[in-house]
Image (cartoon, rainbow, N blue to C red):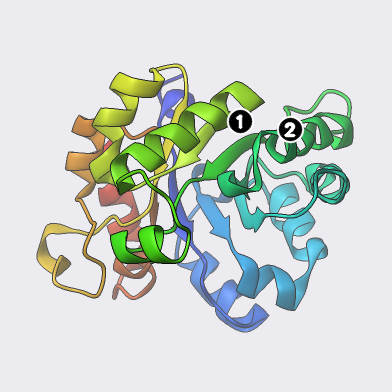
Amino acid sequence: MEEKMAKPVFVALDVASKEELDNLLAQLGDPKETSIKIGMELFYHLGGEIVVDLAKKGYNIFLDLKMHDIPNTVYNGAKQIASLGIKYTTVHALGGSEMIYAAKTGLVAGTPIGQPVPKLLAVTELTSISDEILKNEQHCDLPMNEQVISLAKMAKKAGADGVICSPLEVKTLHEKVGDNFLYVTPGIRLQQNTDDDQSRIATPAQAKIWGSSAIVVGRPITQAEDPQAVYDMIKKEFN
């Protein structure tokens, strides 16, 4: 029961080939106790079949494709990926409420009978978007934190199950958007390697305290000498 209720720690599988994927997964342990994030690089290279195969093996899969198109196209895309056996997927909140609603509707329509509908997570503003870009290129009058809150509220109202956000934003989002929403946070680092190229980061323990629903971890696990040992340590620290 305790294992079932554990909050997911998704390993970002940012690899370019089937060989690299197999090597990494072999070092992560039991598929039924492993949550993985598949992004554009892997999906565009190996396609839906690899997702189906990994789902059948028991992996808890977050398919991170960040859908962003007209509502009808997103509906049809979501309907297709819902049949792959995934548990989570993403859209861009900037696509608007109608598109988010279409994505959720597509996921419901495409999910096989008896299977849970994948959770829909909305990406607010990418971590690469600076205050300057927000103001001068997106022509947004709101400061970054208010923009993220605004997009999260809109996504929730449109039917999303949660958002992708910085761990530093989670506490405020709980207060402003509510606790009955998922807050999935990348930018997780271990204490000893917080000096890399990402600035908006937190440790698993901090993410737990601030209220993250799930975390995404890449290089600290995938580049470790013993990926499974580090993965198990992070899962324990986060839960």
| Residue at 73%, 29% in the rendered image | 117
- On residue 104, the disc is 2
Residue 165: percent from left, percent from top: 39, 45
Q: Is residue 53 left or right of residue 135?
A: right
Question: Badges 1 and 2: C-beta atoms under 8 Å apart?
Answer: yes
Residue 222: percent from left, percent from top: 39, 70
Q: Residues within 10 Å of mark 2 (few under 14, many from 20)?
A: many
Q: Quadrant of the C terminus?
A: top left
Front one among 83 and 76: 76
Please give the residue where the numbered disc 1 appears in the rendered image: 160
Q: Is residue 168 left or right of residue 81?
A: left
Tag 2: residue type?
A: Lys
Query: Could you tell me if residue 62 is visible in this image?
Result: yes
Q: Secondary structure at mark 2?
A: helix
To which quarter of the image does residue 27 belong? bottom left
Disc 1 and disc 2: Cα gap in Å? Answer: 7 Å
- On residue 87, the disc is none
Tag 1: residue type?
A: Ala
